[in-house]
Amino acid sequence: MKVRTSILFKMMVRSVIMITLSIMAVEIISYYLSGRQIRDLTTVQQTTLTEIYRERLGRKLMSAQEDLQFLADLPSVTDYFKFRQFQLDIEAGESLASAGAYFRKLIDRQQSYVYIALNDRTGNPILNILRDETSVPASLTEAELNKIATSDERVINLGPFEDSGTKLVMQRFVIPILVDSNFAGFIDLTYDHNYLMGDLKRDRIFDTGFLFVIANDGRVIYHPNLPTHENLFSSNPGLGTFLRTSSMTQGSLDQEDQFFSFSKMDEKIGWYVLAMSPKSEMFAVLNRIKMIVFLIVFLNILVEALFIFLFMRVVITRPIKKLLDVIKNIEAGDLNHRANVPTNDEIGVLADSFNHMIGQIQDKEAYNQMLQRNLEETVEIRTRELSESKNALALIFENAPIGLVKLDYSGKIIDCNSHFINFFSKDESVLKGCNIGTIVGEEVWQTASRILSEADNSRSYHFDIRYITKKEDEKFIDSVGVYSAGDEERDSFYILAMADHTERKRNEKQLEIERAKSQHASKMATLGEMAGGIAHEINNPLGVISMRSQQIMRVFKDRPEHMTKIPDFVDEILNTTLRIEKIIRGLRSFARSGERDPFVKCSVSGIIQDVLALCAERLRVNEIDLAYENSEGVLIECRAIQLAQILLNLISNAKDAVMELEKDRKIILEVKELAEEVEISLSNNGPQIPLGIRDKIMQPFFTTKDIGKGTGLGLSIAKGIVDDHNGWLFLDPESRWVRFVIVLPKKQKPQYDQKR
């Protein structure tokens, strides 16, 4: 009984919550459909209508003005006034008849035109074309005639008026006729006001809202409840103030009991199209919506109450009784009964849970026995697999084509394969238990073990071992090590893999020797090309020394009175000697190999000056202008001899290139200091290198020179030297001259013999 009461209480709480939520929904809907939202919707509707009718009226009025302009531009109209001026009555009559035919065609074509009249300057009609004989054009006031005669506007809108014959409202436009810039008369076109405003009369907003048109001074152009020309601003000054002060072409005005929206027409027309709706009708829509919502809520409450009654009677009471019977059987120890509740609600889920619980209790012992059997079978399978994996691993370890060794945490050899034993030519009994440091070197092993033990298990370390065998043979062994960290230090171990690279090392050493020979040969070839200029460069100073020595001898022998000039002669001899010494020092430095020199900080300007001293004479003899701006203060870490070789080679290539020119041979050497680098560029105005071979010029033995004039090694060696300096050598593809660029770091990075 307690269970039934609890469920009933929950159902009541659920009903209260549903009713509360329904009322909240009503309030939310009422909020979102409040007066502000209704007003916004009305604003959009009214503004859209005023914009539509503004466009329609504009098109109709524009069409009438264009027709009036067409009539005024007729030659027969102006010809009439000219003929009348000279009293040519026959010709004037013919022109008037021609104009009348055009007037008649236009009024027949446009059903909205009531009449078209041609008037003289005093307003008297000369030609009248009427659609209906009962329609009589209204006479114009003196003020209107003055406005027509003096207005700068091409087409003048005189606004609506009441036809004296038909008593209908008409819309009137006039256009002045000028003859020799003088006002001669005007054309009067009257428009059916009902046709113009007919669309506005048909549309309604809500029940009593409507559209109307007023002029910018408040005069009524069309209003369903007010006569034409009555001033609306007099009865509604608030609307007048708003329209006069507003700079917008569209807008809305919220008054106490009315809501207005407007669209302003072209300034030349000066009309407003307005829409008005009573606020009472706006909020009547909201009240109807609220009533509908409250009705829906009331019906929902009735349905909910009926549902609760049926649910309590059919769905809850009977299943709970069945469930209570099953619980009593379980308390008595009877596990063979089940709760038969064929529903998917909470009570049905609870009954299924009871049934499932009983089944679990019955199957528990059988399940435990099955689990134990599966566990025993799994242990047996895993044991067999581990044994097979261990045998396979041992087979791989022993027969691997490289040397493998396993070390404990302290570096002692635990196990190794036959390749490892062959590397070091020792017995297995001697190696096992031995510390690896005694074989590969204590310093090498300490570095490797420290790096591996500080890293994670996935990191490897690469190092080279140089080993001398018992036969005094030198071996080079390439090694890679990994470290596996255990939970405790004694459970950790190292694995090293080793491969004999002695033959590769020997080949690399021989290749380096051959490369050095090729580099030296290229250097000597470049030096040989410069030899003629260098000899001339030394001969000139020697001639100066010989001449000044002879002059000193003559002074001592024949002209003692010129003894004061001897110090100047001696200074010139000393300077000339220093010049020869500089050239010879440059030759000696250039002639030797600098590849094993350390990287030292050097002056870029000093290196360039030494190079220019070797090649200046040769360039001068060949009438080559080499431009170089001194770069004092620019320092760089480099091998000075190798950098000089690169520059001398590039200058030699540039010299050969510009020799193809008959005159105006130029070479430009530039140095640019960057933040972390120095850029050295050499440009010449010789022929451009073809696009097809630009990618090949850095390759060894590739040359564009004739056979016997080049080795094809200069740029290849230069690129190798720049690479050793961690820099770049490239051909500038965007330069209009042939420009090679060298980019070198100011400071070299430390070099390591060991790599990870």
Image: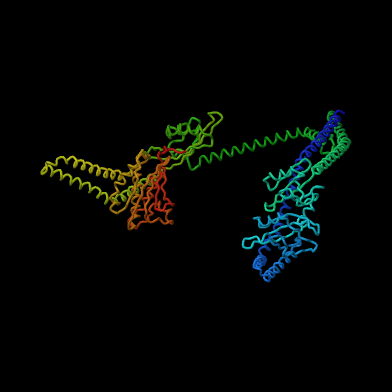
Q: Tell me: 687 left or right of 326.
A: left
In the image, what residue occupies the spot 42% across and 52% down?
A: 735
Q: Is residue 26 visible in this depiction of the protein?
A: yes
Query: What percent of the width, then of the height, locates residue 576?
Result: 23, 44
Residue 288: x, y in percent? 83, 42
Q: Residue 748: where, in percent of width, then height? A: 40, 39
Q: Residue furthest front?
A: 87
The number of callouts visible is: 0
Quarter location, residue 319: top right
Q: Is residue 286 left or right of residue 575?
A: right
- In the rendering, at what x and y percent does residue 747 appear? 40, 38
Towards the viewer: 315 or 102: 102
The residue most toward the left is: 558
From the viewer's perspective, is residue 713 above or below residue 107? above
Query: Toward the viewer: 602 or 70?
Result: 70
Res. 378 image quadrant: top right
Name the residue nearer the viewer: 225 or 283: 225
Colour pattern of the rendering: rainbow
Q: Based on the displayed image, in which of its 4 quarters is residue 149 positioned?
A: bottom right
Asked if 590 appears above or below 74 in the picture, the reply is above
Q: Say if residue 506 shows up in the picture.
A: no
**Residue in front for this viewpoint, 220 or 593:** 220
Q: Horizontally, is 644 left or right of 398 in the view?
A: left
Which residue, as the protein is rendered here, is positioned at the far bottom?
Answer: 90
Give the position of the N terminus as an image quadrant.
Answer: top right
**In the picture provided, is 152 more to the left or to the right than 708?**
right
- Whether 362 is drawn above or below 703: the answer is above
